[in-house]
Amino acid sequence: MRVILTRMISVPNRAIPVLSRGRPRGIAIAAALTLALAACSGDTSTPGDADPAGSPEESSAPPELAVVGTTTIWADVTSAALCGLEVAAVIPPGADPHTFETSLADRAVLESADLVIANGLALEEGLTDLLATVANGGTPVIEMTEAVAIREMDDDHHDDHESDDHDEHKSEDHDDHESDDHDEHESEDHDDDHDHSGGDPHIWLDPLTVADAVPAIIEAAIAAGADTSVRACGQDYIDELEALDGEIRATLAVIRDDARYLVTNHDAFGYFASRYDFEVVGTVIPSLSTLAETNPADLADLAAVIEELDIPTVFSEEQTSARDAEALADAIPGLTVVALDTGSLRDGNDDYLSMMRRNVTAISEALG
């Protein structure tokens, strides 16, 4: 049996959440961050408990390993894939990864890591420069969006709800939104808010895409020093993710085909919609990032789509303000607002599988 002890990472004035799937989470973290990798055998011994006579396994034990995830979601996924490794998350529970800003403590954590698991595609916009610095310093930084098939975006990726079936939204009644009076919405600032070029970073909202990313986590951890036994744990977790996919399909089966429309806070549910046969017909914030802002013209257009398709619910986000979604609900009789978890777990006791089940239950109850 092997025990892999952790290094201690000094983290001044910052508590860094540590996620460990299927193991006790009662670990106090204040001035220091403890990262522990326990072998799949579940052995809880320490070096002081070693057999006095010694054993061959002691000398072959893997080296200490410290793995850090940028978000709580990727920290939890990494923990599950690596046999219960306790993985620090730089961005704390409940925080929006799009708007998170770094501190000196975050740099210390990342520079002390043996491996960093990041999302990529500018999801963690405030971490981009720091992650590049850490990588240039020799720390392996693995971006999950480099390991899976990416949904490519362009400026007209919402054409699916501006097709012939919905041409009335291009009618004379809405020509005023394209008039000179609204030229400011074609300004550079507005174009930035609507910039959907490149890839969609929200890959974790599809569990089968997460399953596709697990082997990259496993092999990067082995390259960083983890024992090859983690491959079995990784496969077990892939099996769980595939089972979750089946659960999701069963839960969503109550929603009629003609009711599978999503209106979300920002453009985060593209992978989910593609996997489970939904159409994202609009977003409160017309962007892949919550850093963008909405405007009255966009909200008016969105309200018209909601009323035309008789959509009962707008899905806001636990991690961001629901003010604009609630304003829509106030303006449209019968429209409700339901919050989903998107970019973060709720707390240290939450996990990715639970988060997805909560979201799917909420969607099923709202639209079914």
Image (cartoon, rainbow, N blue to C red):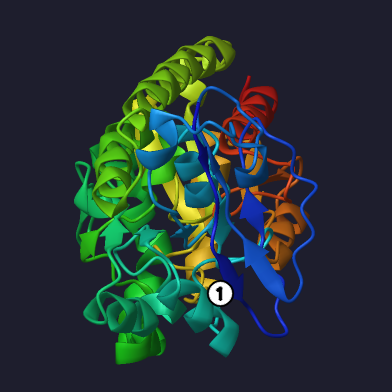
Please indicate whether residue 141 sits to the left or right of residue 250 in the image: left
Residue 200 appears at what percent x and percent y?
30, 55
Please indicate whether residue 339 sits to the left or right of residue 228 in the image: right
Residue 69 appears at what percent x and percent y?
47, 58
Q: Residue at x 42, y 25 (%)?
A: 233
Q: Is residue 322 above or below residue 216?
A: below
Q: Nearer the viewer, residue 226 or 210?
A: 226
Q: Residue at x 34, y 71 (%)?
A: 194
Q: Nearer the viewer, residue 30 or 313?
A: 30
Q: Nearer the viewer, residue 43 or 118?
A: 43
Q: Residue at x 40, y 65 (%)?
A: 123
Please indicate whether residue 107 sits to the left or right of residue 133 in the image: right
Q: Secondary structure at mark 1?
A: helix
On the image, numbered disc 1 is attached to which residue?
296
Indicate the quadrant where residue 214 lies: top left
Please indicate whether residue 261 sits to the left or right of residue 19 in the image: left
Q: Is residue 302 visible?
A: yes
Q: Is residue 210 above or below residue 31?
A: above
Where does the C terminus fall, quadrant-wise? top right
Q: Is residue 103 above or below residue 254?
A: below
Kindly identify the amino acid type of the residue bearing the numbered disc 1.
Pro
Residue 364 appears at what percent x and percent y?
63, 23
Residue 243 appears at what percent x and percent y?
47, 13
